[in-house]
Amino acid sequence: MKNSGSEVRRVCPAHHHTGWCLGKTSEGAALFRPEVANRDVAKMNNAPPTVIKMYAAREEIYPREISGRYATLRWACVWLTQAVFYGLPWLNWNGRQAVLFDLGTRKFYIFGIVLWPQDFIYLAVLLILCAYFLFLLTAVAGRVWCGFACPQTVYTEIFMWIERKIEGPRSTRIRIDKQPWSANKIFQKLTKHAAWSAVACWTGLTFVGYFTPIVFLQHEVLSLTLGPWEWFWILFYTFATYGNAGWMREQVCKYMCPYARFQSAMFDKDTLIITYDQERGEPRNARSRKKGTDHATDTVLGDCIDCSMCLQVCPTGIDIRKGLQYDCIGCAACVDACNKVMDKIGTARGLIRYSTENALKNHLSIEQIKKQAMRPRVLIYSGLLLLIITAFFMRPNFAQAAQARCHPRPWFTRARS
Ligand code: SF4
Ligand code: SF4
């Protein structure tokens, strides 16, 4: 934008030229009215420049520990997924590692099945099935994968547990972080990072153990005779786990996860989301009693006592009372927190709950919400899923091929050795 004497000129946003524009916007309105433009530009030229930052530093989030139905479910997912991930490479099957993706010999061993390079179609079909299942799950239950079983959530949960055990609960952690450095603070921080690093290293080692027999790998680690690629991938996966679960946490979900970006395309007004019941909760007011009247304004109060517990337990630091936000990973920690508050003040649970946009608007019952699950989008995803599974298993040679692959094979020698 320029101001030369009394003439005011600026770049036309539609036609990219300077000077007055007689062109029209798509709505038919004139792009510039000289008197308005002159006045606006004169005002703007006198105003101090505004700097718009493209980067915002992360604000530390201190999620409060919470127990409840959904916290238990999340921990069950943590145990289950980690038992499978850490345990599977140690399982043996007919004298060899049960699950091994041996890139050196180009054979994938999955229990009794051995896949060769020409069998990659099976892996491709498996990946397509997983993707479709995830689409179906998202259409019905929203971000339930993100909140309970995604590796980012699972490792963050483990790392936060370690943090709480070493540094203490939320209030203590906030206090410690505000204090100046002391011997005790340094010791606590070092212990925490050492514990995080140990978990991250073990995770990196296990990951590589799916590609190199883990029995050999552990000997190589202990004798420091790892190959360059093994070093690279162990360190890469270790740093990724340590960085993502220890430092970046909610930033991964907010800014890096590609699935978070496109899953809203699978949402509709009947998808389950974590919702705050505005009608029931508002007008909120900080108080210790259940319902009542704000005597200053003579307003009948809602059920929300504005205790901020839902905000304190949120791993992404958002206030769900402001409505559905893309940062919400659907972990339901706020549901557990609010239910506890409702129990304490002696009113019905579910001020924050799993519901749908449609159910909130039309006051649908749980039975009606369940019925809405059988809608065209869900039926199409289910139909496609069934079609792929049926087509895959009905392939004439699949049964013989699977049978042939089930024959036990002698233990292989590693390509590198
Ligand atoms: S936890 Fe429940 S009562 Fe407390 S602020 Fe959140 S919505 Fe309101
Ligand atoms: S708003 Fe609730 S469900 Fe969403 S991320 Fe925060 S705690 Fe989890």
Image (cartoon, rainbow, N blue to C red):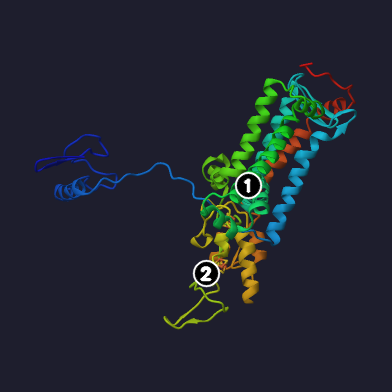
Name the residue at the left extreme.
6
State the quadrant of the N terminus.
top left
Residue 109 locus on image (x, y percent): 80, 28
| Vertical relation: 403 (above or below) 381 | above
Residue type highlighted by circle 2: Asp
Residue 232 locus on image (x, y percent): 65, 25
The residue carrying mark 2 has its beta carbon less than 8 Å from ligand 1: yes
Asked whether 119 or 57 is in front, the reply is: 57
Crowdedness near tag 2: few (<14), some (14–19) or many (≥20) residues, C-alpha within 10 Å? some
Crowdedness near tag 1: few (<14), some (14–19) or many (≥20) residues, C-alpha within 10 Å? few
Q: Earlier in the sequence, mark 2 or mark 1?
A: 1
* Secondary element at image label 2: loop
Please give the residue where the numbered disc 1 appears in the rendered image: 187
| Vertical relation: 377 (above or below) 359 | above
State the quadrant of the C terminus.
top right
Q: Say left or right for 251 vs 87.
A: left
Residue at image position (27%, 39%) is 14
Q: Is residue 372 visible?
A: yes
Classify residue 408 by image quadrant.
top right
Image-quarter location of ligand 1: bottom right
